[in-house]
Image (cartoon, helix red, strand yellow):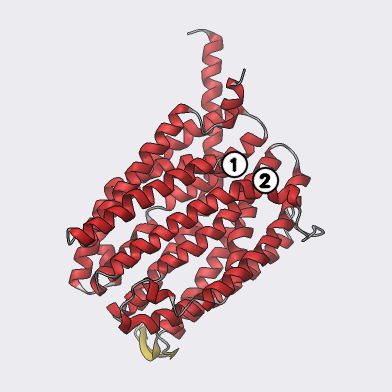
Amino acid sequence: MSQSALQNQSSKKKGRLSMLAVIFALAWPTMLEQLMQTAVQYIDTAMVGSLGTEATAAVGATSTVNWLVGSTISAIGVGFLAYISQAFGAGEKQRGVGAVGQALLSVLVVGSLFTVLTTALSSRIPVWMQVDPKIRKLASQYFLIIYAPMLFRTASIILGTVLRAVGDTKTPMRVGIWVNLINVVLNFFLIYETRQISLFGLKITMPGAGLGITGAALASAASFTFGGIAIFLTLWRHPVISPRGQSLKPDMAVLRPCLKVAFPNMLQRFGTSLGYVAFASMINALGDVSTAAHTIANTVESAFYIPGYGMQTAAATLAGNAYGAKDKERLHSLSRTMLPLEIILMIFSGGLLFLFAPHLMGLFSKDAEVIRLGTTVLRMVAVSEPFYGVPIIIEGMMQGVGKTVTPFVFNIVGMWGVRIVGTWIMTTFFGGGLISAWACMIAHNLLLCLLFSIHFATGRWNPLREKAMEP
């Protein structure tokens, strides 16, 4: 091998190692933030689970509506992420900062809209979700309380994404840690009655409000409110992307390209999240045991997606920077580095999920049937984890370069054509239960892997490649 070839190979190796360092610098705070959120979700589920299967079902019965609302708002954040990361990648800092005022405007408009919608519909949603009539009142009360601070939740989602767009993943992580700690502490005092606890051999009287599910909801609402205020104040003082002096009047020069990216992503997230609602509705109709097992299994599984979605944030930001700089080689290198890394991480997380599924289910329920059913579906989905990691990364890179139409089509086809139709057929005509429903969910994930892999292999995801091929 010639000296120049050796130097070129060495340069590529150094470049890849440098990119790995940047990827992990962006990804680990997001992973830690999600890990904390999941840990708190585990604690919430365990605390509520101690109140009984009905309590778990009442809380979990409307959880997919939370995904529907949250993911729709997140799509707006994706539009700002693409715009700001591309602007900073192109060295146009002022253009990127100018978008922050529009992000604040979006928080006010969207947050207010969802506050009105969710609180007004809180009594109807458990009915539409086919929640067991004996727990509908509890489910409705829980839903109303956690959605009252929707403006603050919207601020946390959109403004947190704005910070990540400039590579600041640590600030949302720090705020998220405080949000989760507040939630856990308030849960401890609001859910349970005043009781005696043993600490280092001493008997201590621990005060408690004894509010049960209502206490869990109040704890979540208070932590959401703190999170929204904290993320706004942090952004306001931020040295790179503070919105001070920015206008809150609609600026279509900024909003138009943001909405061009956000709208297909919003339709995708709305459509797929609506699918989750339909999916959960069909599972709720199977009874309390299936609902509880599904709720707990979803909670357990979410921890094992952390490597995937943490890496997706890094992929979107770095792809946006590379595209803004028109750096074709960097964008190509990013894709070749992140996909193998993601697959390795998801194989590891899937293996852990398979091994520890029964122990994790046992943390949240003492019902033997709930544990058995949840363990079965978790081990099924653990095998498909590596395949699900592929579309997560490819979609993240496509979000960064502003290509969101194709992911919209793929996700809608997979959700409604495979998961929903398949579950409806299995439960309605073949008497299938939770296991058959999760089998349809896995088939949906495998289809996404195939569709995104083919699209990636053709190179159509990469706008710089397309421009290079134009005559």
Image side of residue 55 versus residue 261, left or right: left
Residue 325 in sight: yes
The first of marks 1 and 2 along the sequence is 2
Q: Which residue is mark 1?
A: 402
Q: Is 320 situated above or below 145?
A: above
Q: Image point 56% across, 28% down: which residue?
A: 15
Pointer 1 local density, CA inside 10 Å: few below 14, some 14–19, many at least 20: many
Q: Is 73 situated above or below 56?
A: above
Q: Position of residue 353 (x, y in %)?
A: 29, 54
Q: Is 393 situated above or below 328?
A: below
Q: Position of residue 334 (x, y in %)?
A: 53, 33
Q: Position of residue 35 (x, y in %)?
A: 45, 59
Q: Which residue is mark 2?
A: 257
Measured Cα–Cα span from mark 1 to mark 2: 9 Å
Q: Nearer the viewer, residue 419 or 350?
A: 419
Q: Disc 2 residue type?
A: Pro
Image side of residue 321 versus residue 217, left or right: right
Q: Image point 38% across, 76% down: which residue?
A: 127
Q: Position of residue 441 (x, y in %)?
A: 31, 53
Q: Residue furthest top?
A: 2
**Image quarter of residue 279:** bottom left
Q: Which mark is residue 351?
A: none
Image side of residue 434 versus residue 321, left or right: left
Contact? badges 1 and 2 (CB < 8 Å): yes
